[in-house]
Amino acid sequence: MGIYSAGADTARPVKPRCEVPLRDSELPIRLAGLLERLSGPSPVIGVVGLGYVGLPLCVELAGTGAQVYGLDISESLCAALNAGRSHVGDVSDSALAGAVAAGFRASTDAVCVERCDAVIICVPTPLRKTKDPDISYIIAAGQSVAAHARAGQLIVLESTTYPGTTQEILVPMLKERGLTPGEDIAVAFSPERVDPGNPRYGIRNTPKVVGGVTPACTLAAEALYRRCCDTVFPVSSPAAAETVKLLENTFRMVNIGLVNEFALVCRRLGLDVWEIIDAASTKPFGFMTFKPGPGLGGHCIPVDPHYLAWKLRAHGFTTRFVELADAVNSAMPEHVVSVVGDALNHAERSVKGSRILALGVAYKPDISDVRESPAIEVLSLLHGRGARLSYSDPYVPSLKLDSGIMHSVVLDAQALREADAVVVLTDHRSYDWELVLKEARVIVDARNATARARAVAPELASKVWAI
Ligand SMILES: NC(=O)c1ccc[n+]([C@@H]2O[C@H](COP(=O)([O-])OP(=O)(O)OC[C@H]3O[C@@H](n4cnc5c(N)ncnc54)[C@H](O)[C@@H]3O)[C@@H](O)[C@H]2O)c1
């Protein structure tokens, strides 16, 4: 069967982006009134999982007049949120306090699901040690939602996952409760696209893709997200929406892998990869800039493509780009450590016993998230080689490694002078790169963060080793 003949739901043409009015008359009888409630002044919306994705969504929805219930398994987190204390960098305490004043409540009790017109699930989707998907959080959250679900609601999964999860995992839980998606209850997938720390794109101006189990389910998801997103883009099924997210993140992973390989290529050719990238980036078409670094980090890019690879293995297909990019990216921390070794060797020192100061341990600039951060791997490798380590990161006061807990040190002239080598792993904007270049003895710069400082003081440039 061709993909366009798989059934009525997948065969329907995708609607244009334009904002056509959503009419309740298009819904089956048991969903009647849902669009009106979701588009109305104060629908009741539940968000399950109050982390980097769920909490900003709660605040945005509360700002549209919705009564928002946040559901999490952490009692202490719920208490802090209800007291107006945010743990997510993109949500200020004052924005959270505004949401609380507007009626937002966090709770560990899933009974609030019964009151909701819509429930959005945003729980973690990590990998197991084997790099296979761990969907246990989706299963647990799905079960608690299904236990309290009722006819006339919309349930949306936002957690990044492999194609088929909504249909294969969530839908059967609801059917077990006697709720048929598309008839009694609307069910959809909508990928989260939040980019923590991005000052330009937030929930409102990042288009939202939605794919319902039936056309009626898609309509309901459109009505929900039109509250808080300027553009909602419907696709033909939950599996299509799940795959959109995996394409986006695989695209990024593969291109970072390519540019990391170019860093290794340029090193062998005696060329400066940053000069090559800067020059290539002047092409106004057909090129997109990606930057090399110490490896992939964060909860998404190093993780999500493995969900795709795992699913495709079950179809007897190998996602070769994912595997190749993973191999290149995973080797970058070891490469950084080998450059540190070369730099110290040049100074007639060994890694063992040397004092090495790492600048930045968050996985990207100006945020505190250290999940999957390549800095952790770099520090662990250096520790294994006997280095005496310290780090400075204004966003991460302490860091847990297998070897113990480290605490961030103040970045000043003394800390820089005391280190035998400084390794730049995250280019936070608050760092004083001219001070770093002036005071450090040897710098391994995995982010090209010192470029401007080197232009100002070219006589100091020989201290810096690129990766
Ligand atoms: N962080 C990002 O930048 C980002 C971006 C796009 C997509 N995503 C995806 O969004 C999803 C959520 O990611 P996140 O970064 O918000 O995770 P997170 O770890 O920050 O937050 C998840 C929250 O879910 C809670 N939780 C776990 N199990 C639960 C359950 N059974 N019931 C209720 N709450 C439960 C946890 O206590 C935690 O507070 C993941 O699939 C992730 O891949 C994340």
Image (cartoon, grey):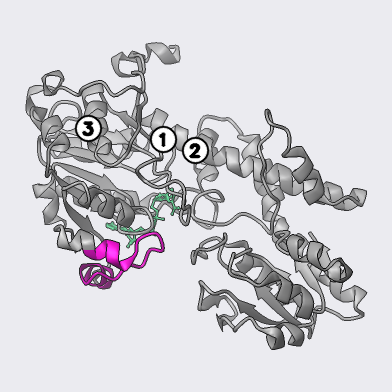
Name the residue nearer the viewer: 352 or 392.
392
Q: Which of marks 3 and 1 is in front?
A: 3
Q: What residue type is labelled 1?
A: Glu
Q: Determine which residue is flagged by label 2.
A: 246
Q: Which stretch appears magenta?
A: 76-97
Q: Residue 383: tell me if it is visible.
A: no
Counting from the top left corner in percent of width and height, residue 459 is at 89, 70
In terms of image quadrants, where is residue 339?
bottom right
Q: Is residue 406 left or right of residue 281?
A: left
Counting from the top left corner in percent of width and height, residue 185 is at 16, 33
| Numbered badge on residue 85 | none
Tell me if residue 359 is in the magenta stretch.
no
Number of labels in the image equals: 3
Quadrant of the picture in which ligand 1 is shown: bottom left
Counting from the top left corner in percent of width and height, residue 288 is at 66, 37
- Cβ–Cβ below 8 Å for labels 2 and 1? yes
Q: Quadrant of the C terminus?
A: bottom right
Tell me if residue 95 is in the magenta stretch.
yes
Query: What separation in Å lies between label 2 and label 1 (alpha carbons)?
Result: 7 Å
In terms of image quadrants, where is residue 72?
bottom left
- Work out whether mark 3 precedes mark 1 in sequence or the reverse, and give the earlier one: 3
- Work out whether mark 3 precedes mark 2 in sequence or the reverse, and give the earlier one: 3
Counting from the top left corner in percent of width and height, residue 312 is at 53, 33
Q: What residue type is labelled 3?
A: Ala
Query: What separation in Å lies between label 3 and label 1 (alpha carbons)?
Result: 19 Å
Q: Which amino acid does label 2 sit on?
A: Leu
Mark 3 and ligand 1: say if the CB distance to the nearest ligand atom is below 8 Å: no
Q: Is residue 246 above or below residue 13?
A: below
